[in-house]
Image: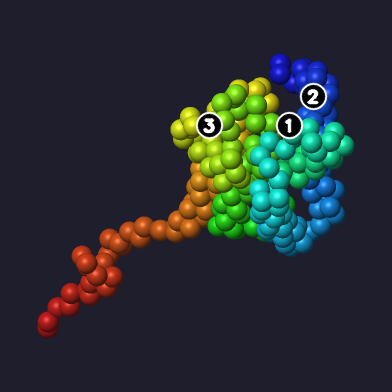
Amino acid sequence: MLRKYDPINTALSKPYSIFAKYSCYFLSPTWLFAKISSKELGKEEHTKILVIRNHFYLLTSIFLFILVGFCMPPGVLGNKQFGIGFILIFTALLWMIPFSRCNEIFFAFIKDALEKTSGDEAKSNLTYRKRIELSFLSYLELILNYSILYYVMPLSWFGEESSGHFSNIIDALYFSGVTITTLGYGDFSPVNALPKLLVLEQVLVGFTLIIVSFAIYAGKGLSLKKPNKKIKFASKNTLPGTRKKPRAPYLKR
């Protein structure tokens, strides 16, 4: 009976899949670039590219964190002294790199988790240990990227009182860290809808990364290391505690 509805389900799911695909491309241009650049690569080349891109984007996040934190005041997007042109260009840069990378990490780990749980063939030769290492680096990158996004937002989005505003990039880093770990001490609280949504996204991405890393990667890795111990049963013709067969009794003549 279910086979009759397969064409209908396919027809209904195809527009949804196309919409979801292009929405992911819009939210993460780096995700689109990664798919295009690794389309014709083999497993070995794809593995090397994954490791290189992971380290490259982490170093890029560290560079942007230092550049933005020590060269720009907090709430730069709400500062009219910089001009509308600078704000638009800087917003596009934030969307192309930090925000895009946060979404790419989320999409990539969700996709990889679905492939691992469904038994699909791996597209790379990454071991589960290496995947956990890259997950940890991605976790650090998320904290840095979100701290940059929080830091440049208008100060009024975090309340009218100055005590709730970021005074430096370390405050934004602290807020990003307590947000992704869901500690939430309450000393910084967004009041605008945009940072509130960004907080929810960060919590979702952080939890996804932890669940995929430890529940799937660690579980799969441990299952591969379990030795297949074969229980050997002693033969009925062996002596207790030994593997020697008893000698047949002989009669003295």
Q: Mark 1 packing: few (<14 Cα in 10 Å), some, or many (20+)?
A: some
Extreme left residue here? 253
Count every numbered label the image shows and give the total: 3
Decide which of 76, 23 is in the foreground and name it: 76
Query: Where is mark 3, residue-wise?
Result: 163
Q: CA distance from mark 2 to mark 1?
A: 37 Å
Residue at 84% across / 40% down in the picture?
86
The CA span between labels 2 and 3 is 45 Å
Q: Is residue 37 left or right of residue 167?
A: right
Tell me the element at label 1: helix
Image-based side of 231 in relation to 25, left or right = left
Q: Residue at x 58, y 40 (%)?
A: 167
User: How dense is the environment of label 2, judged by Cα within 10 Å: few (below 14), some, or many (20 and up)?
Assistant: few
Instruction: Give the amino acid at mark 3.
Output: Ser
Q: Which residue is mark 2?
A: 16
Is residue 18 rendered to the left or right of residue 188?
right
Decide if residue 101 is in sight here.
Answer: no
Real-space Cα separation, disc 3 to disc 1, in angstroms = 17 Å
The residue pinned by badge 1 equals: 78
Q: Is residue 191 visible?
A: yes
Q: Label 2 is placed on what type of residue?
A: Tyr
